[in-house]
């Protein structure tokens, strides 16, 4: 300030001082209507609005599905125990309707776990190949492959499954072709990119010094991968598998096209089956809104929602265990 | 074998021509050049590393000293595009040769890094980790080696009650001594230390320095350091690197009191770098 009183050393300095003189600190720095940060406020409102819409959509869906899904038990008197444990699904029988959804619940879990069983080793293996074995050219080839797999619509997977896989299974493995086996193969291809890309991130985010530490002790590459990198990345790898399973659990269209959609509990992997999602998509069109059968479909939807919450909780638990 | 070598034009002659002297040399570097792709990081350096002594490598960042250090146990192999020419003779073998089993080499020439890098496992497992790879399975033997190496690394008293706790629960200085301990457990002949105490507080630093001096009895140590006091305190010989060249290599005392090259004096007195 002192300097500014005397006009001055350099031209620029002089300009700076004059400008400072014109607007006193009080006007420049104290909040007023003139310098209120309007843009700031508008931006804030905009993003809050986005967040509120998302949150309220989620909450509304949960509430809606909750009330609709519980109606079959509360209003229609379907026994929850029967719904979850009985294997007899016969809602259209006028005299003695049965609402046992166990075959579908079982079908959903079966295809999900079986698909994960195939896709997890493949996806994690591909991730290790991309990050550890051939980081340059391996990644260059596999990355687009993975992205392409994500982009293929599920109806196309189903269509290919229906025209290629089902006849193949029928001819070479046995059964009708429409089976748990076909469902699990189609699903495993569908969740492969999810598992691969997340597992690649998990492996790739491991610090370089872990690898170096192991190599410097005379460990081979495979020993390093198996004993240091995989254990260190395990929470991330499990998250990848769980996310893949969540996707498999909710997939409807592709599975519906190859699984056969029968009401019976499958006794072997070659038997046709059905999942919660396929039963909902197949029956929602021809049941009357408000009827008992329609309400039980909502109950199945509720089970799907509860399961997706469970998957999310599992993922949260796993990522909280990440140590590095 | 009490020998050193005289520099000669032909490399074959160099290996054969040895002259009796006082000090035994564990490593003989001859005309070593290291490239990262097209870029040359080390320009044909030659130096002999004495056995059971501490050799300090000093120089400004990017001068090639770490690159040189990492070539001694072939850690540069992990960097795509890195290659080395020339010779590093270790017990009459050129360890830069393609025929070298780098995994076996790294067991004999161990390395400790700037940032303490324990595995996210227990203290005990951090040490047995690499031992198990070398085929050691018996628990009694492992227990013994864990205690022995932790003793040598001056960490035993601090961790003996919590060997099965996570290594990540240790302080930075303890972690670094654990990393030294797990290298010791492999019973190497040479230990390469890449700024081992630069990430530590002064007290941990002092402990690590004491440890390094103690280890000189059993191992030949090459240490890269940015800390001039550290180099002068603990090392027997000092090599000054600048832009990939070895400017001066001599007894530490001579380097720090009466260097023969002007650049060395300027760097040591802090005029650049």
Image (cartoon, rainbow, N blue to C red):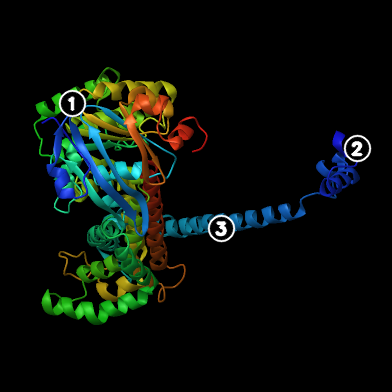
Within 10 Å of disc 1 (Cα), the crowding (few <14, some 14-19, many 20+) is: few
Of the two numbered discs 1 and 3 in the rendering, the one whose residue sits closer to the viewer: 1
Label 3 marks a residue whose chain is: A
Mark 3, residue position: A54
Of residue B239 and residue B210, the one placed in the foreground of this image is: B239
Label 2 marks which chain's residue? A
How far apart marks 1 and 3 lie (CA) works out to 79 Å
Q: Position of residue B59 (x, y in %)?
A: 41, 38
Tag 1–tag 3 contact (CB < 8 Å):
no
The residue where tag 1 is placed is B22
Return the x and y of residue A184 as percentages of the image width and height: 24, 66
The answer to which image quadrant residue B108 occupies is top left
Q: Earlier in the sequence, mark 3 or mark 2?
A: 2
Is residue A91 visible to the viewer in this orientation of the structure? no
Badge number at residue A5: 2
Secondary structure category for the residue under label 2: helix
Residue under the image location 17 percent in, 54 percent down:
B98
- Check disc 3 and report its element: helix, strand or loop: helix
Foreground residue, B114 or B90? Answer: B90
The foreground one among B183 and B193 is B193
Q: Chain of mark 1?
A: B
Near mark 2 (Cα within 10 A), the count class, few <14, some 14-19 or many ≥20, is few
Q: Along the line of sight, which residue is nearer the eye, A260 or A156?
A: A156
The quarter of the picture where the N terminus of chain B appears is: top left
- The answer to which quarter of the image holds residue B111 is top left
């Amino acid at each position: 300030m002192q300097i500014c009183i005397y006009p001055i050393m350099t031209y620029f300095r002089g300009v700076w001082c004059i400008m400072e003189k014109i607007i006193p600190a009080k006007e420049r720095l104290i909040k007023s209507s003139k310098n209120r940060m309007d843009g700031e406020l508008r931006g804030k409102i905009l993003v809050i609005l986005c967040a509120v819409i998302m949150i309220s959509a989620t909450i509304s869906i949960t509430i809606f599905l909750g009330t609709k899904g519980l109606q079959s038990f509360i209003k229609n008197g379907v026994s929850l125990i029967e719904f979850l444990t009985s294997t007899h699904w016969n809602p259209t029988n006028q005299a003695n309707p049965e609402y046992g959804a166990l075959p579908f619940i079982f079908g959903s879990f079966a295809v999900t776990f079986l698909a994960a069983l195939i896709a997890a080793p493949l996806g994690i293996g591909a991730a290790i190949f991309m990050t550890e074995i051939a980081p340059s050219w391996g990644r260059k080839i596999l990355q687009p492959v993975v992205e392409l797999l994500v982009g293929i619509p599920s109806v196309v997977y189903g269509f290919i499954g229906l025209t290629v896989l089902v006849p193949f299974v029928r001819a070479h493995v046995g059964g009708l072709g429409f089976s748990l086996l076909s469902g699990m193969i189609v699903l495993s291809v569908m969740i492969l990119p999810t598992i691969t890309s997340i597992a690649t991130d998990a492996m790739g985010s491991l610090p370089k010094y872990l690898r170096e530490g192991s190599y410097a002790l005379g460990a081979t590459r495979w020993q390093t991968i198996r004993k240091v990198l995989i254990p260190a990345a395990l929470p991330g790898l499990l998250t990848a598998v769980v996310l893949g399973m969540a996707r498999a659990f909710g997939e409807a269209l592709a599975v519906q096209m190859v699984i056969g959609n029968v009401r019976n509990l499958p006794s072997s992997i070659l038997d046709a089956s059905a999942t919660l999602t396929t039963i909902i998509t197949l029956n929602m069109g021809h049941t009357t809104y408000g009827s008992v059968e329609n309400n039980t479909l909502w109950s199945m939807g509720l089970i799907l929602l509860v399961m997706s919450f469970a998957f999310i909780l599992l993922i949260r638990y796993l990522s909280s265990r990440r140590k590095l | 074998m009490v020998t050193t070598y005289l520099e000669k034009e032909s490399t074959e002659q160099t290996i054969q021509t040895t002259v009796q002297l006082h000090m035994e040399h564990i490593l003989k570097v001859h005309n070593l050049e290291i490239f990262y792709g097209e870029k040359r990081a080390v320009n044909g350096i030659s130096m002999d590393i004495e056995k059971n002594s501490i050799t300090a490598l000093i120089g400004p960042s990017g001068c090639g000293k770490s690159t040189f250090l990492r070539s001694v146990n072939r850690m540069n192999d992990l960097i795509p595009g890195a290659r080395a020419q020339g010779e590093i003779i270790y017990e009459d073998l050129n360890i830069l040769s393609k025929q070298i089993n780098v995994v076996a080499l790294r067991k004999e020439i161990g390395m400790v890094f700037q940032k303490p890098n324990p595995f996210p496992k227990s203290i005990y497992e951090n040490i047995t980790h690499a031992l198990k790879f070398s085929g050691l399975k018996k628990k009694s033997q492992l227990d013994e080696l864990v205690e022995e190496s932790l003793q040598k690394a001056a960490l035993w008293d601090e961790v003996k009650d919590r060997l099965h706790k996570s290594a990540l629960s240790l302080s930075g200085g303890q972690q670094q001594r654990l990393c030294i301990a797990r290298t010791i457990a492999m019973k190497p002949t040479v230990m390469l230390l890449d700024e081992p105490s630069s990430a530590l507080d002064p007290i941990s630093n002092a402990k690590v320095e004491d440890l390094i001096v103690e280890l000189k009895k059993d191992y030949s140590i090459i240490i890269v350091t940015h800390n001039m006091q550290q180099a002068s305190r603990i090392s027997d010989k000092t090599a000054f690197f600048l832009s990939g060249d070895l400017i001066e290599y001599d007894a530490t005392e001579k380097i720090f009191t009466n260097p023969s090259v002007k650049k060395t004096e300027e760097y040591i007195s802090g005029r650049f770098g």
